[in-house]
Image (cartoon, rainbow, N blue to C red):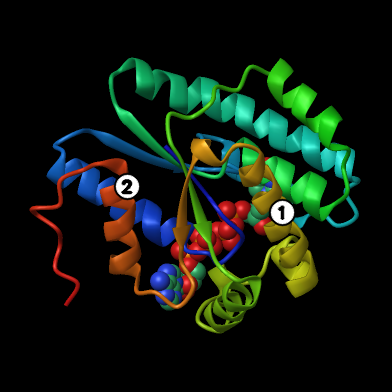
Amino acid sequence: ITIEGIDGSGKSTQADHLANWLSAVADEKVIRTFEPGGWKGGKTLRKFILETKNLCTMSEFLLFMADRAEHLHRVIIPELLAGNHVVCERWNESTLAYQCGGHGMDYDFAEKVIASCSFPEPDVKIFLDIPPVIAFSRMKSRENLDDKYKRDRFEAEGLVFLEKVSSFYHRLIAKNPDKFIMIDCGERQEYEIAGEIMRKLGVELSDEPNSD
Ligand code: ADP
Ligand code: TYD
């Protein structure tokens, strides 16, 4: 299961709920992971990608590809082979939305490389749909809380960048609407959103955690 959306859309928050609820309610072993850098050793590559200034878009793209290949082979495939569910923040659509939509990379080229890398299609793709202006204001308020929320170089590109990425996500989804679970996340409580995700996944919610 992948969770997609612009920065600040609530991916980490919803990935936590989804992983917890799937483990508790459906009694399944669930692995929670993310890109970039969700593998042992991946922190270094994540830091490099997110902090190196003036990386050209091609390098940026290829580094995300390398990160995905390591993540796939070291984490995702072994977990799936062990029979576990994998909940992953970001996957191929992030690359298309950010590198093509945000940074102008050629879409046909990017799609061909992704296909040539044989990165598997998730069984379920969840898209957290939120107006960029709301996501942006969340990012701004969280960055004052702690240094760990300092904006990375993508987040630092600002609202116009986020709008370009968001509209590219919408174009990708419009091409294949049946492949996505689309969730409206603007001005909604996190447990309400989590409940809708679980319902759309078809999971019984008899043990729904209390939001109080
Ligand atoms: P992402 O992983 O997509 O960047 P996060 O899950 O980190 O997003 O959420 C971004 C910020 O918004 C965090 O401070 C989080 O606590 C807050 N947040 C998440 N979901 C909601 C929501 N439904 N309503 C209001 N704030 C939210
Ligand atoms: P992430 O840690 O998910 O940021 P956030 O939690 O704020 O959403 O991702 C870091 C940044 O990397 C994010 O701004 C999006 C970018 N990114 C790409 O540009 N292309 C990609 O293929 C991926 C996986 C991420």
Residue 179 image point, x, y percent:
51, 36
Q: In this view, does 195 lie to the left or right of 138?
A: left
Would you say 75 lies left or right of 167 here? left
The residue tagged 2 is 200
Q: Kindly indicate the quadrant of the structure image that contains residue 59.
A: top right
Residue 197 appears at what percent x and percent y?
A: 34, 52
Asked which quadrant contains residue 71, the reply is top right
Is residue 133 shown left or right of residue 108?
left
Q: In which quarter of the image is the N terminus?
A: top left
Q: Residue shown at 52%/77% (left/top)?
A: 146
Q: Can residue 46 be seen in this view?
A: no
Confirm or reject: label 1 Cβ below 8 Å from ligand 2. yes
Residue 5 pos. (x, y %): 57, 55
Q: Residue furthest left?
A: 206
**What kind of element bears circle 1?**
helix
Q: Name the residue under label 1.
A: 50
Q: Is mark 2 on a helix, strand or loop?
A: helix
Q: Nearer the viewer, residue 2 or 195?
A: 195
Determine if the C-beta at disc 2 is less than 8 A from ligand 1.
no
Q: Which residue is drawn at 29% across and 26% down?
A: 84
2 or 1: tag closer to the N-terminus:
1
Q: From the image, state whether disc 2 or disc 1 is nearer to you.
A: 2
At 39% from the left and 74% from the top, the residue drawn is 188
Q: Could you give the CA–CA distance between mark 2 and mark 1, rounded to whole angstroms? A: 33 Å
Q: Residue 189 at x, y = what percent? A: 34, 74
The crowding category of the residue bearing disc 2, from other C-alpha atoms within 10 Å (few below 14, some 14 to 19, many at least 20), is few
Indicate the amino acid at tag 2.
Lys
Residue 120 in the image: above or below residue 137: above
User: Residue, x 56% and y 70% (percent of image)?
Assistant: 149
The quadrant of the picture occupied by the C terminus is bottom left
